[in-house]
Amino acid sequence: MRAFDPSGRPRMKIVTWNINGVKARLGNLLHWLQESAPDIVCLQEIKSVDEQFPRAEIEALGYNVETHGQKGFNGVALLSKLPFDEVNRGLPGNDADEQARFIEGVFSTGQGALRVVSLYLPNGNPVDSEKFPYKLAWMERLERWAAQRLELEEPLVMAGDYNVIPEPRDARFPQQWVNDALFQPQTREAFRRLENLGYTEAVRAISDSPDIYTFWDYQAGAWQKNNGIRIDHLLLSPEAANRLASASVEKHVRAWEKPSDHVPVAIELRFAA
């Protein structure tokens, strides 16, 4: 059921979640879809080719499904209660890049087009390997694409696992991450450049709390010790930011059996009736 704000206007719930293997977490995903009732879901690390994605089970819950998959790792998907008007797969700017990390859906609303992206930004570790330059180059491509999309002056949500710890307060123990690609100065600067284009980071637009995390490693009791980091973000164009009603982290999902190491991050956007 669509949520409403106190004025009676409907809200659209958009959620990003790095599922860390859709087949391994299918039971959790189906349970969560019924519990959380999102309108649009951005999944990352589906780790499935398109043909083997469990779309039938998800479609049975009333969702339209579009995927950009890859065998064994990476892969992104969009699940939507709204029909897709358009789907674009792959981040432009490098035709040789075959990694499945980007999918854009376009939807019609009563107030015009809505664009939603599910993205899985490269991890970049180890920093002294070719993986870190690939990460930074991918972020440069994303910046160029995001700048062009702003020219459309439409609500746009870029949601996903950015593999970026934006600030020290976004890690329980930031000193543990100083040598990690997620916390390198170049990584954080690239993320700030995205924001400086005119995008609003939804969670920080709602809360300044220092203890908001979206990822807890499976190792060393990170979850039990709340040794987390915040690397899953939703960046909003000005037209989307003007509709932002709420942002939240559905942290309880991390305590489920066979959890992903990430949890869903949700926003609600106001759409006038």
Image (tube, rainbow, N blue to C red):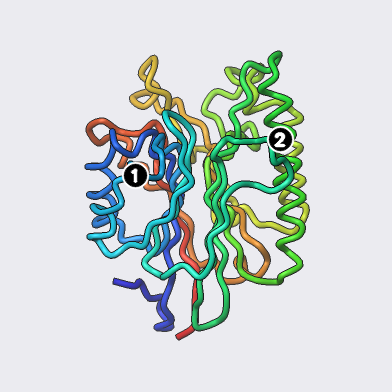
* Residue 183: x %, y % from top left: 65, 27
* Residue 224: x %, y % from top left: 33, 25
* Residue at the image point whose x is 25% and y is 49% from the top: 30
Q: Disc 2 on helix, strand or loop?
A: helix
* Residue at the image point whose x is 41% and y is 77% from the top: 10
Q: Quadrant of residue 182?
A: top right
Q: Amino acid at mark 1?
A: Phe
> How far is the residue under mark 1 from the one under mark 2?
33 Å
Numbered tag placed on residue 188 in the rendering: 2
Q: Quick check: 97 left or right of 258?
A: right
* Residue at the image point whose x is 68% and y is 66% from the top: 238
* Residue 94: x %, y % from top left: 72, 40
Which quadrant does the C terminus fall into?
Answer: bottom left
Residue with the most extreme bottom position: 273
Residues under numbered marks 1 and 2 in contact, where contact means CB atoms less than 8 Å apart: no
Tag 2 or tag 1, which sits nearer the N-term? Answer: 1
Q: Amino acid at mark 2?
A: Arg
* Residue at the image point whose x is 69% and y is 57% from the top: 199
Considering depth in this image, is 131 or 164 the residue closer to the camera? 131
Which quadrant does the N terminus fall into?
Answer: bottom left
Tell me, yes or no, if residue 114 can be seen here.
yes
At label 1, counting other C-alpha atoms closer than 10 Å, the crowd grade (few under 14, some 14-19, many 20 or more) is many
Q: What residue would you read off at disc 1?
A: 53
Q: Disc 1 on helix, strand or loop?
A: loop
Q: Is residue 158 above or below residue 124?
A: below
Q: Quadrant of residue 242?
A: bottom right
